[in-house]
Amino acid sequence: MTFTDLRITRQFVRALEEMGISTPTEIQQKAIPPILAGQDVVGIAQTGTGKTAAYLLPILQHLKYHQPPAPRALVLVPTKELALQVEKNMATLAQFTDLKWVALYGGIGPKGQIETLRGGVDLVVATPGRFLEIYAREELSVKKIRHIVLDECDRMMDMGFWPQLREIQEKIPQKKQQLLFSATFPPKVGHIADNFLLWPTRVEVTPQATPAASVTQYLMEVPNVRTKLNIMVHLLEDASTFTRVLVFARTREQADQVAKALEGRAGGGIGLIHSNRGQNARIHAIENFRQGELRILVSTDVSARGLDIDEVSHVINFTVPGHHEDYVHRIGRTGRAFRTGTAITLMDPSEAWHIKRIETLIHQPIPRAEIPQGVEITPTPFAERQEQLREIDRQKRLDDPGFQGAFHEKKQAVRNTGSRHKPISGKPARSGKRRR
């Protein structure tokens, strides 16, 4: 099948040819026809399968040519990084048209974005918060919007955007085509589909939350953070195999720790992106990584949304994601655009609970791998071990609300044996009286 078979017009086929793309992916084959026909669509596909073009191509074709002043299409995304990525795809796909667009996102002042809007645009890609901010200034007209896309909807729900999405829906005209795209389809996303979409056509290229077949997965059971860092340094010394590596950490502090540990030891340059980094620094790091000037990029989950880099050889999960659907998003950053890739996850004892649920979500076990020979396995510090045990107790309470914790069980065992009242080393037990 070709894009011409999907009734994509010549100016967009030419743009695809400029990108070196001649064959539509599976999600594009399934999603483009109903979108062109004006149907509401729910698209479920892993990252890296071409879902952005699957909705942009038919929408741009609906828009046809520049018609100022008010926008006619809106794409809502969870993060500024994804907004920039969608804008980049738009610029490439619409290069042989006179269509105009703008990306609205936070982290910078809105003045330049407002000036672009005043000049007249056909399509807006925006994060929900910045969209509502500019709308409240009466700088954004929504009365002509006829197409709306909710991209990476599962992540928007994880980030608590439901109230903003509902507010935006109330402001946009009732008569419109609505598209929802997501890598996973948890109940929260189903709730949005039920509330916003009218008799949607559901297209799904693989069972939801199934990792792409082009990604080989491994998991190493590791006792502590220091050993994880030792493994990272050992692996990344092999620059011929680990050619372009994306490292994920759960928190900003962990990302900082990893970047500092690898700096000067892994070679090839290291970039760091998370929400505490300035917008320009983040964009600069992503572009340098994309161009190959940096071999390693360390990121948190939110900051990595929108990373569309074809030549990532490896994804390393330094910590297991707390939102289990994020595992699919993380490892989907490799094995993109018909390439293969490898995802390695480092799991300490407090993360085993999350791995079990991830394996249930992706409908497959993650193969285990041994810690490489030559890696120093360090003893777990007392404070870190205590933190792991507290986290394990918290997980047990989630499974069993009646569970009162390991400390409580130890205390109860002491009471049951009566050892608390036995003399120690021949000394008499203390009386129960308090000294005033």
Image: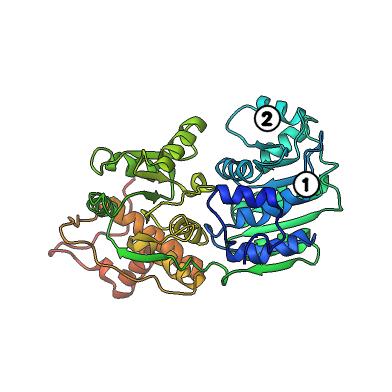
Pick whichever, 98 or 241, lies toward us: 98
Pick whichever, 284 or 97, lies toward us: 97
Coordinates of residue 150 in the picture (x, y in percent): 68, 53
> Is residue 44 visible to the viewer in this orientation of the structure?
no
- Residue 202 position (above or below residue 75): below
Coordinates of residue 211 in the picture (x, y in percent): 48, 66
Quadrant of the image for the N terminus? bottom right
Q: Give the colouring mode of the picture.
A: rainbow
Tell me the tag on residue 63: 1
- Residue 390 position (above or below residue 303): below
Q: Is residue 66 left or right of residue 153?
A: right
Tell me the quarter of the picture where residue 125 sits.
top right
Q: Is residue 8 left or right of residue 172?
A: left
Amino acid bearing label 1: Leu
- Residue 112 position (above or below residue 342): above
Residue designated by label 2? 113
Pick whichever, 17 or 324, lies toward us: 17
Coordinates of residue 268 in the picture (x, y in percent): 29, 41
For label 2, the SS is helix
Pick whichever, 100 or 346, lies toward us: 100
